[in-house]
Image: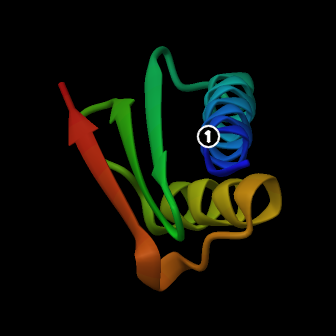
Amino acid sequence: AAAYSDITKLAKAMEDETNIETLIVAKGFEKCVAVVNGDTASVIVSCDTLTPGETAQISEIVYEAAGIVPANLKIIEKN
């Protein structure tokens, strides 16, 4: 039962990561990688600098896709 629970949690995190990445790329970012770990997430986006509006968009996408609040989100800009 414990192993099944762990597998279910892992599958949900993988689904959330895929959904986040797809939605962020759809917003115009060239590349994106999302990592969900429980109630925290990290998102790496390919860009020079994020505007406050873009940061808000990413935060909203992560919240809607995975229920992770912006306080538990780390956004990393990668050039």
- The residue most toward the top is 30
Q: Is residue 60 above or below residue 18?
A: below
- On the rendered structure, is 9 left or right of 44? right
Q: Is residue 62 above or below residue 33?
A: below
Local secondary structure at mark 1: helix
Q: Where is residue 4, by image quadrant?
A: top right
- On the rendered structure, is 64 left or right of 42? right
- On the rendered structure, is 11 left or right of 36? right
Residue appearing at x 65%, y 35% in the figure = 7
Q: Is residue 67 above or below residue 30?
A: below
Residue appearing at x 63%, y 42% in the figure = 13
Badge 1 density bin: few <14, some 14–19, many ≥20, Cα 10 Å: few
| Figure colour scheme | rainbow
Residue appearing at x 26%, y 48% in the figure = 76
Give the amino acid at mark 1: Ala
Q: Is residue 16 above or below residue 55?
A: above
Camera-side residue of 55 and 15: 15
Q: Where is residue 19, by image quadrant?
A: top right
Provide residue 59's location: percent of width, then percent of height: 59, 64
- On the rendered structure, is 40 left or right of 14? left
Residue appearing at x 18%, y 25% in the figure = 79
Provide residue 69's location: percent of width, then percent of height: 60, 79
Q: Report the residue marked by disc 1.
A: 3
Camera-side residue of 63 and 11: 11
Provide residue 31's location: percent of width, then percent of height: 45, 17
